[in-house]
Image: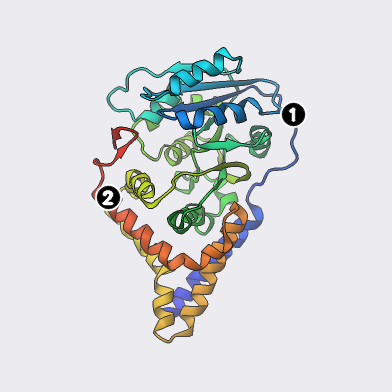
Amino acid sequence: MTSALFFFSIFLLWISLANFITIRRPGLVQEIDKSVSVLIPVRNEAVNINELVDCLTKQSHLKSLEIIFIDDSSTDSTNELLKTAISEGAPIKMVNAPELPEGWLGKPWALQQGYLIASGEIIVTIDADVRLTPTAIAQAIAMMGKGDFISPYPRQIAISFAERLVQPLLQWSWMTTVPLRIAEKSTRPSLAVANGQFFLVTKSALDLTSGFQKIAAEVLDDMKLARVLIATGAHGGVADGSTLAKTRMYKNFSDIKAGYGKSLWSAFPTRLNTGIAITFIFVTGVTPVLVWFSGNPIGLFTFQIIVITRALSAKRSGGRILDSLLHPISSVILIYLIIYSWRARGKVQWKGRTL
């Protein structure tokens, strides 16, 4: 059994190394001839509006750029700030999403409104808490090449101890389990990897899915959209966007619990999926330490290998390499969050709505 654990960790290390070397990374910036539409759904994002408008209007090397903010029934000063930016000459558009209909969640509904009026050949969606470098969109389009979509993974800023324990597991999960270059060419939706914080897709590919209609009620809209696109014959995947974009998703454990509570159950929608996920996390994160402390050196070797996979992920994504040593603690917390998410399903409040 311990030998199987060791060889399994070697297998994960092989995938991590392959992805570390082959993952798409930004190249030299170049002029983009295709027209681009950026869709930004916002709901009570007043704290982010000014910086977001600033970084979007500074995008360079794009011959045609359309920036569309979709206000999803904000109750703070989001709407007023956008109107002020427009009145002061910011080259942006703003639309108000109609009242949320039955069968839709807020973000997909807002994105659908932007999609319906977008004129660009490339559709870019970003979250309000993401900040882009001036050449981010141009370099991301260049990375996409002849593909249909790409998801440049932003650098996840983690400052508090809770963030440092949990946030790195996001990129580690796919860096160690999904051969990214194979996934890009695969027709299997199960291999899809994406992050809706910064997502680019050709308008022609999105037209085949009727925009965001097929993910209307999906909490994990990014992963589901990637799977829907692949199911229609599109190709694409995740890329290293750590030098192009950055974001701080949560600031404390309370935020993390609410954020993961609303979504993790959707990532593992059946009890079988959940059981497999928890088993994987326990086997890779906790079991090596238990075996090591029992006096078996294989446990130490396995723990070291897993830490190396975490370090590779951190290096490629702009994270803290030393936090990799905390992987066993991170794993226990993630297992707790998965269980909590299932128990809180349909009860968690997010931006004033129950998910």
Point 27% across, 54% down: residue: 271
Locate the C terminus by quadrant: top left
As shown in the figure, which amino acid type bears the numbered disc 1?
Glu
Q: Which residue is mark 2?
A: 342
**312 lies above or below 293:** above
Nearest the eye: 120 or 159: 159
Q: Which residue is mark 1?
A: 31
Choose top left, top right, bottom left or bottom right for residue 312: bottom right
Most extreme residue toward the bottom, as rendered?
Answer: 295
Is any atom of residue 22 visible in this view?
A: yes
Q: In the image, 317: left or right of 354?
A: right
As shown in the figure, which amino acid type bears the numbered disc 2?
Trp
Nearest the eye: 145 or 324: 324
Point 44% across, 41% down: residue: 223
Is any atom of residue 115 visible in this view?
A: no
Mark 2 to mark 1 CA distance (whole Å): 46 Å
Q: Estimate the x, y position of residue 255 in percent, counting from the top left.
A: 38, 46
Mark 2 crowdedness (10 Å alpha carbons): few <14, some 14-19, many ≥20: many
Q: Estimate the x, y position of residue 160 in percent, counting from the top left.
A: 47, 54
